[in-house]
Structure formats: structure tokens, C-alpha cells
Amino acid sequence: MSETEPIVLPLARKASGDSNQTDTSSRRGGIAFDRGELNQILDVYGRKVASGEWRDYAIDSLGEKAVFSVFRRSSECPLYRIEKAPKLARRQGAYSVIAATGLILKRGHDLARVLRALDKGLRLVEA
């Protein structure tokens, strides 16, 4: 191999117009969070980690939805799941926050508004 020879990866495909080849988006699994959505989610996650409530997370890109799972400990089931399901965008909204029990805490079209369900602060209760 010479120094001027390009490195060719085994999974890289040439754009030859062959209809049998698939693009990278269909190979990766489909739906994913974009950079802006991840920034909003990680802002909430950072605040909760700083307060000691959360410790770990996982991101899954599935065929029909993207899931951001939040854990108290990595060995447990997720406390909350933040899901993006574009198929529901016209009806209930693409974004939802789901508790560990499966209860949908908030669903909507705006991610920032949906994430407010996780930011419930302390409230003064009078007796």
C-alpha cells in the first residue's frame, strides 16, 4: 500500500446508481434525535445528574421511533423514556415522556414543553 492510495472501508459503498444498494440512513435503523433535540434533552439530563437523581442514559434508534432512556443505576430498568415517534406527529405529537410503569406523563408537538414534565420543582404545601 502506497502513501497516496486511499483507505477503503469494507462497509463503504460507491454511488454507482445500483438499485440493490441501500443508503446509510436505512442501514442505521431509521429514526434518530437531531442535534437540537439532543441538546434540549441533555440540558435536562445534566441538571438531574448534578442534583444526584440520575446517573446513566441510553439512546436507541429503532425503526419507528428514537428513545432516550434515563436510569438511576445502569443495572435497573429506565426511570423515564423520552420518545420521538414521527408517525404520531400529526395526531398526539411526536414527543412523549414515559415513566417506568408505562404511564405517559406528557405528549406533544414541542419537545421543550414535553420535557417540562421532568423538571417539576419543589412546591410549597400549606397545611
Image: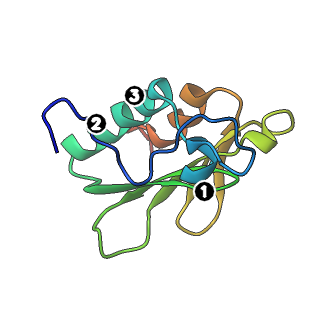
Residue extending farthest to the left is 3
Q: Single out the residue that lies furthest toward the bottom.
A: 75
The label shown at residue 62 is 1
Q: Which residue position holds label 2?
A: 47
At label 3, the amino acid type is Asn
Circle nearer the N terminus (2, 3):
3
Question: Gap between marks 1 and 3, in whole Å?
Answer: 20 Å
Q: Secondary structure at mark 1?
A: loop
The answer to which of marks 1 and 3 sits earlier in the sequence is 3
Q: Amino acid at mark 2?
A: Arg
- Picture residue at 61% right of the left edge, 42% below the top: 23
Q: Residues within 10 Å of mark 1 (few under 14, many from 20)?
A: some
Pick whichever of labels 1 and 2 is earlier in the sequence.
Answer: 2
Q: Report the Cα–Cα distance between label 2 and label 3.
A: 12 Å
Instruction: Name which residue lies at 43% across and 72% down.
Output: 77
**Horizontal and vertical percent position of residue 30:** 63, 47
Q: Which residue is mark 3?
A: 39
Let me know if residue 96 appears in the view.
Answer: yes
Disc 3 secondary structure class: helix
Residue 51 rendering spot, x and y as whole percentages: 22, 44
